[in-house]
Image (cartoon, rainbow, N blue to C red):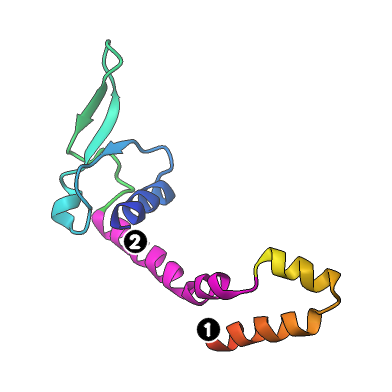
């Protein structure tokens, strides 16, 4: 998940950025080991450098974006828990066809109360 946050943060800060990393990026030291792709050679192989060529991508900005992404993810924890426990689509269809929406709503409300916003 740490790699995903790093990748997402970079893509938000500069969508067309290409880079390579082998370990999770958790610290500024890790960030300084990222290999930035700056082009390709005559054999169409990537040219890479650990010198960050993008002034708009700093560790402070990446870290702040990763923190924001984690906060957004954490804020939706209730929604993920609710989704796992809500009646299934099949249960909803049966409730509609069987004219049993009241019981369906009772089940849904119980899940909402269990996992409030």
**Magenta extent:** 59-87
Residue located beneath label 2 in the image = 66
Q: Please state the horizontal and vertical placement of residue 67, each as a whole percent of the image.
A: 34, 66
Image quadrant where residue 109 sits:
bottom right
Whether residues under marks 1 and 2 lie with C-beta atoms below 8 angstroms apart, the answer is no
Q: Please state the horizontal and vertical placement of residue 23, each as a whole percent of the image.
A: 19, 48
Q: Please state the horizontal and vertical placement of residue 53, each as a whole percent of the image.
A: 26, 38
**Secondary-structure class at tag 1:** loop
Would residue 11 be found to the left or right of residue 96 on screen?
Answer: left
Q: CA distance from mark 1 to mark 2?
A: 25 Å
**Observer-nearest of 31 and 98:** 98
Residue drawn at 26 percent across, 16 percent down: 41
Image quadrant where residue 84 sits:
bottom right
Residue 75 located within the stretch drawn in magenta: yes
Neighbour class for label 2 at 10 Å: few (<14), some, many (≥20)?
many
Dominant secondary structure (helix, strand or loop) of the stretch shown in magenta: helix
Would residue 117 be found to the left or right of residue 95 on screen?
Answer: left
Residue 93 located within the stretch drawn in magenta: no
Query: Which residue is at the far left?
Result: 29
- Nearest to viewer (mark 1 / mark 2): 1
Q: Quadrant of the image for the N terminus?
A: bottom left
Q: Quadrant of the image for the C terminus?
A: bottom right
Residue drawn at 36 percent across, 38 percent down: 17
Residue located beneath label 1 in the image = 115
**Secondary-structure class at tag 2:** helix
Residue drawn at 32 percent across, 53 percent down: 6
């Amino acid at each position: 998940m740490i790699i995903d946050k790093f990748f997402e943060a970079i893509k938000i800060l500069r969508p067309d950025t290409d880079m390579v990393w082998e370990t999770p990026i958790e610290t500024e030291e890790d960030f300084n080991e990222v290999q930035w792709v700056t082009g390709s050679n005559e054999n169409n192989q990537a040219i890479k450098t650990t010198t960050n060529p993008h002034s708009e991508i700093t560790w402070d900005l990446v870290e702040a974006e990763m923190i924001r992404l984690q906060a957004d993810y954490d804020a939706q924890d209730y929604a993920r828990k609710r989704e796992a426990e809500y009646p299934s689509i099949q249960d909803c269809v049966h409730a509609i066809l069987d004219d049993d929406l009241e019981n369906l709503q009772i089940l849904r409300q119980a899940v909402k109360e269990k996992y409030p916003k």
